[in-house]
Structure formats: C-alpha cells, structure tokens
Image (spheres, rainbow, N blue to C red):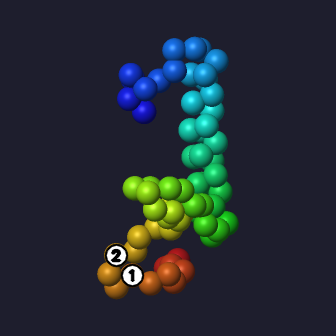
C-alpha cells in the first residue's frame, strides 16, 4: 500500500497491518491444506494458493532419501 493511501488514524493503521497478517496466514494455511484461497486480481477471481508449475514438472513426491 502506498504511503499516501495509508489511513491517518492509528487505530485504522493497525487494522491494515492486521488484515495483511490475516491474509498471509490464510494463504499459508490454504497451501498447507491444498485448498483454494480466492482473491480478486486485475478484476478477475483467482486462486492465490495455486502455485504455477514449470513445464515438465509433475506433482510427485520426492523419492530421494
């Protein structure tokens, strides 16, 4: 968030930080539990928890020990 967009009230400023922490926690939990975490990005609803895979990569467990 740009500095000029930050609230002037200290209570509201604290709430912005709390919302950011909450969003980060929700995204971490969604990735851990393999569930979607939908957000609006560029006017479209997208799954923020989905990680883009490189071409040729598969979702297989690592068998090296």
Q: Label 2: which residue?
A: 54
Q: Could you tell me if the residues under marks 1 and 2 are in contact, i.e. CB atoms within 8 Å?
A: yes
Identify whether 12 is placed above or below 28.
above
Count of labels in the image:
2
Farthest-out residue, left: 55
Q: Secondary structure at mark 2?
A: loop
Image-based side of 54 in relation to 59, left or right: left
Viewer-closest of 12 and 31 = 12
Residue located at (57% from left, 61% from top)? 38
Residue located at (51% from left, 63% from top)? 45
The quadrant the N terminus occupies is top left
Give the quadrant of residue 20. Answer: top right
Q: Which mark is residue 5?
A: none
- Percent x, y for residue 56? 34, 85
Viewer-closest of 51 and 59 = 51
Residue located at (41% from left, 70% from top)? 52
Identify whether 60 is placed above or below 34.
below
Q: Which mark is residue 57?
A: 1
- Neighbourhood count class around disc 1 (C-alpha, 10 Å): few under 14, some 14–19, many 20 upward: few
Q: Secondary structure at mark 1?
A: loop
- Percent x, y for residue 13? 56, 22
């Amino acid at each position: 968030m740009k500095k000029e967009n930050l609230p002037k009230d200290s209570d509201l400023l604290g709430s912005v930080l709390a919302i950011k922490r909450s969003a980060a926690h929700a995204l971490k939990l969604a990735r851990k539990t393999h569930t979607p975490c939908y957000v609006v990005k560029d006017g479209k609803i997208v799954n923020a928890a989905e990680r883009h895979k490189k071409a040729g990569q598969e979702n297989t467990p690592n068998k090296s020990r």
